[in-house]
Amino acid sequence: MMLSTEESIPLPHWEPPALPADATGRALGMWGESLAAGHLAARGIDILATNWRCRDGELDIVGRDPARDALVAFEVKTRRANSHIGAIESISYAKLRRLRHLLLAWIQQTGKHAPALAIDLIAITVDSELGWHLHHVEGIA
């Protein structure tokens, strides 16, 4: 089951990081991952790893979601509103297969376990006036 939540304003007990006006490319991605980590922590998700890498790729964020009793790999996509491909549309079937493989590799390396596994998408769209919208789509794979 896929659930989607949209947050246009920050959660009351959490202050999102400021977006630098000139952020592009890597800086925009790093800001988006910081925003996503804060969003997840505010929702009660335990962050277990960020930017975990192995020879096959990278997981942006790995966390434990107590509400689902699951280990979750969170793929973070940050795009400007005028991008040719939106954040949600940028996830291919090949990317989903790779994320599943990477989550299993992370579990094998760390020895962490949970009754369920999930892959979620955090899609962040930044508009031209430095506002942003965050979509958290649960269970994309």
Image (tube, rainbow, N blue to C red):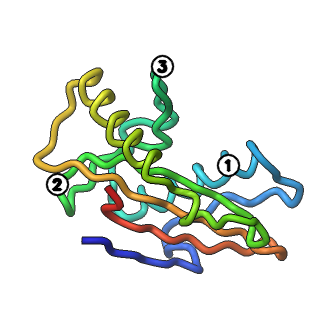
Horizontal arrangement in the rendering, residue 7 relative to residue 1 (left or right): right
Horizontal arrangement in the rendering, residue 75 relative to residue 65 (left or right): right
Going from N to C along the chain, the mark reached first, 2 or 1, is 1
Tag 2 and tag 3, C-beta contact below 8 Å: no
**Front disc: 2 or 3:** 3
Quick one: 17 or 89, which is closer to the camera?
89
Q: What's the amino acid at mark 2?
A: Asp
Q: How far apart are marks 1 and 3 (CA)?
A: 21 Å
Q: What's the amino acid at mark 1?
A: Gly
Q: Give the labeled residue for mark 1.
A: 29
Instruction: Tell which residue pokes out farthest to the left in this image.
Output: 115
> Badge 3: few (under 14), some or many (20 or more) residues near its Cα, within 10 Å?
few
Image vertical order of residue 24 relative to residue 67, above or below: above
Instruction: Name the residue at 27% across, 33% down.
Output: 104
Q: In which quarter of the image is the C terminus?
A: bottom left
Quadrant assignment, res 102: top left
Q: Give the labeled residue for mark 3.
A: 55
Q: Distance between the residues labelled 2 and 3?
A: 28 Å
Q: What's the amino acid at mark 3?
A: Arg
Q: Give the labeled residue for mark 2.
A: 69
Horizontal arrangement in the rendering, residue 78 relative to residue 59 (left or right): right
Q: Where is residue 94 in the image (x, y as percent from the top left)?
A: 45, 45
Q: Position of residue 62 (x, y in %)?
A: 38, 42
Q: Position of residue 95 (x, y in %)?
A: 47, 46
| Kind of element beneath mark 1 | helix
Q: Quadrant of the N terminus?
A: bottom left
Instruction: Name the residue at 33% across, 42% down.
Output: 100
**Front disc: 1 or 3:** 3
